[in-house]
Amino acid sequence: MTDTSTTTGTIEHVDPTTVIVEANVRTTAPLDKEFIASIRENGVLTPILARRDASGNIIVRAGQRRTLAAREVGLASIPAFVVEASEAIADRIIQQLVENEHRTALTDGDRVAAFQQLALEGLTPQVIAKRTATKQVDVKQGLKVAESQFATAAVVEHQLTFDQAATLIEFEGDDERVADLIEVATSQPEQFAHAAQRARDDKARAEEVARISVELREQGYTVLDRDPGYYDDTYIRIGDLVTGEGKRVSPDDLPTEGERFVFVRSYISGSVDVTHFISDYKAHGFRKDGSTAPSGPMTNEQKAERRELIANNKAWASAETVRREWLTAFLGRKTLPKDAAQFVARGLTGSRSTVADAMSRGNSLAHTLLGIEHDGGMWSGDKLAALVEANPGKAATVSLAVVLAGIESHTSKDTWHHPTHDMSAYFGQLVAWGYAASEVEQIVIDHDTTSTDADSVDDVEEHDDDTVDEAPTEDD
């Protein structure tokens, strides 16, 4: 409710049908059945906030929903606190923001519109944040969203948050990815960060594949849109061929013109692989190398397992980025969780070899998580001691960072392939502290409570595409 204790005004009873509802920061004014029923039964108990213009009209500044509901149920009068208020647009918007936050919570769509109006009135993000008691980072995100009609529409239509809408801007034009992210935002918001990072990684890999493909086309290659596989007789990979002298065929042995084919794919690491093919290999004096012949086609079950392996490896790589960003923010908090000291003690005892290994290599990740530059070398000067010396109050945070980084630095895609009790406990602790684990990380957490066949999955470098060859490629 607006604090009227220091505001000069009078309480009046006014006809809701004669007052003028001023342009409001709310983009919508939902009148749910319960709210209307309450107004019908009890009337308007809390006065609306209004001002009187030069012509004597009562202008509603805050209380839009109460006024509209009163009209809906046919009330003859409602109480109004009529003040002598400035007509400045910025003052009106700020006053409405404060009032509405104490009523039905404003949506981020409402705030986007308000922040944009305030910015147009010349207020800086810093001033907007101060006058509306909003975090400056939220104001800046709101203004970023306001600059994009696409993102603003997503906020209003799907009730997305600022950060979710700002993320969508990265994928504007990619309707499929945008639809997927909106689905996650509205159905599993706790998984949005993971979905967004997977989308970023997929986009980056796809862009790199596209760039390399353009270069190859300029060199005269025909770029295939799918991997032919071992049992496609149309294209033969040169890795299966030898020259007449028995030497393995290389790209340099291929004709400079004519039938030169390539398939381009990316790895989870971000590196790009180019596989060369040829069709009429006999015409160039090549022959198949019997030692590279595949043992046989994969079964449907094997193909399904391989697709799952590829998907989980990709998901793990993306989750690592989200997790370490979360750890950085977590260690930046003013206060640590109550059981932080206990976790540190367990780490220095039960996980001593893991933590000690990271310490012996220079604590690079601990520096990164604490926002300290470090070249990553084991002989690089340790700056953590200096941090504690200069800020004794940071001692507990630094200790926690050392243990967290020690364990975290030993995670990899092998962690979900072969989950252990220690890693299950580590990820479980992060969740207990507020981290939203991805589905592939949940496999590790569930290790102690469920039976898993993950140990039987081969640890291989997986491709970014969903193609499953009839037999493993030479690059696997």
Image: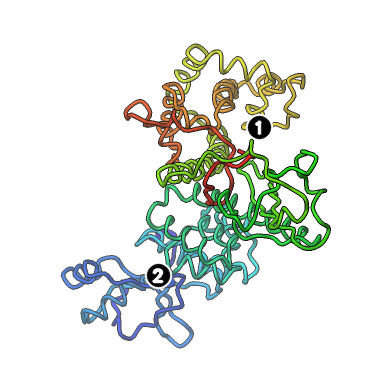
Question: From where the camera sits, is residue 110 visible?
Answer: no
Color encoding of the figure: rainbow
Of badges 1 and 2, the one in the foreground is 1
Foreground of the two, 201 or 327: 201
Disc 2 residue type?
Ala
Where in the figure is residue 191, as x and y percent of width and height? 44, 48
Where in the figure is residue 151, as x and y percent of width and height? 54, 66
Q: Residue at x 35, y 25 (%)?
A: 448
Q: Are marks 1 and 2 in contact (CB under 8 Å)?
A: no
Residue, disc 1: 368
- Residue at the bottom extreme of this rendering: 55
Quadrant housing the C terminus: top right
Q: Residues within 10 Å of mark 2 (few under 14, many from 20)?
A: many
Residue, disc 2: 62
Quadrant housing the N terminus: bottom left
Q: Residue at x 71, y 46 (%)?
A: 287
Disc 1 residue type?
Thr
Side of 263 relative to 68 (left or right): right
Side of 44 relative to 434 (left or right): left
Foreground of the two, 274 or 389: 274
Q: Is residue 339 above or below residue 184?
A: above
Q: Is residue 81 above or below residue 403?
A: below
Q: Is residue 20 above or below residue 445?
A: below
- Residue at the left extreme of this rendering: 41
Give the structural element (helix, strand or loop) at label 1. helix
Foreground of the two, 141 or 418: 418
Where in the figure is residue 390, as x and y percent of width and height? 69, 22
Where in the figure is residue 318, as x and y percent of width and height? 55, 43
Q: Earlier in the sequence, mark 1 or mark 2?
A: 2
Give the structural element (helix, strand or loop) at label 2. strand
